Image (cartoon, rainbow, N blue to C red):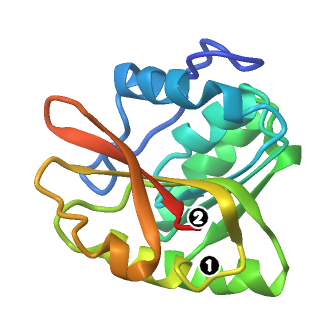
Amino acid sequence: MRVIAGSAKSLRLVTLDSLDTRPTTDRIKETLFNMISPDIPCCRFLDLFSGSGGIGIEALSRGAEYACLVEQNKKAVACIEKNLTFTHLHERARVITGDAVLAIDTLERKTEVFDIIFMDPPYGQLFEQRVLSRLSRSAILTERTIIIVESDLKTDFGYIDQLGFQIEKIKKYKTNKHTFLYRRT
């Protein structure tokens, strides 16, 4: 896995040698960032379920002002910290070790607000529903915040309307998809 573009372009990132994380492929990452590229410069980016940090680091490399990366797996957190240091992006990043919902609580207490929230939870375990439920009543996002959920193709977002979100678009790939959500105004 490598950084696709920006200040850390072409740098290879450390990943876990296990099935504990599932890094977003370079091809899918490039497609995602092509879609959100106008929103990246100077944004505040939250990467939930960060794995080795590839998505948050890509955002920083492409000009995000700040990124917070949240990961529960301590070995993955060690990868994130190595990758941030290696790419010289650590000064604009914060790493939180722990549960994504509890991290949202922490970020609220610090009165942090994000322009883009990305999450790539383990597939098929309904983590995205739990996090979206918490985000629906959270002060860390505004009506302009983009929420992007990476999930398998079968993931159903039929509950989104009840949480006060709307689906803006869905980008499908061979085995997974990105669902773009906004708070309904």
Residue 38 or residue 15, whichever sits in front:
38
Q: What residue type is labelled 2?
A: Val
SS category of the residue bearing label 1? helix
**Residue 36 vertical placement versus 178 (above, below):** above
Q: In which quarter of the image is the C terminus?
A: bottom right
Residue 32 or residue 27, whichever sits in front:
32
Q: In which quarter of the image is the N terminus?
A: top left
Q: How crowded is mark 1: few (under 14 residues within 10 Å), some or many (20 or more)?
A: some
Residue 123 - label:
none
Relative side of 17 to 5, left or right: left
**Does any portion of residue 23 appear in the rendered image?**
yes
**Does any portion of residue 46 appear in the rendered image?**
no
- The residue singled out by tag 1 in the image is 103
Residue drawn at (66%, 69%) of the image: 96
Q: Position of residue 53 (x, y in %)?
A: 56, 45
Whichever of labels 1 and 2 marks the residue nearer the N terminus, that label is 2
Q: Residue 104, located in which quarter of the rendered image?
A: bottom right
Q: Position of residue 149 (x, y in %)?
A: 39, 54
Q: Position of residue 6 (x, y in %)?
A: 72, 17
Q: What residue type is labelled 1?
A: Ala
Relative side of 174 to 178, left or right: left
- The residue singled out by tag 2 in the image is 70
Residue drawn at (85%, 42%) of the image: 65
SS category of the residue bearing label 2? strand
Residue drawn at (74%, 77%) of the image: 107
The total number of labels drawn is 2
Do the numbered discs 1 and 2 sit on residues whose CB atoms are within 8 Å? yes
Q: Residues within 10 Å of mark 2 (few under 14, many from 20)?
A: many
CA–CA distance between discs 1 and 2? 7 Å
Residue drawn at (80%, 87%) of the image: 109
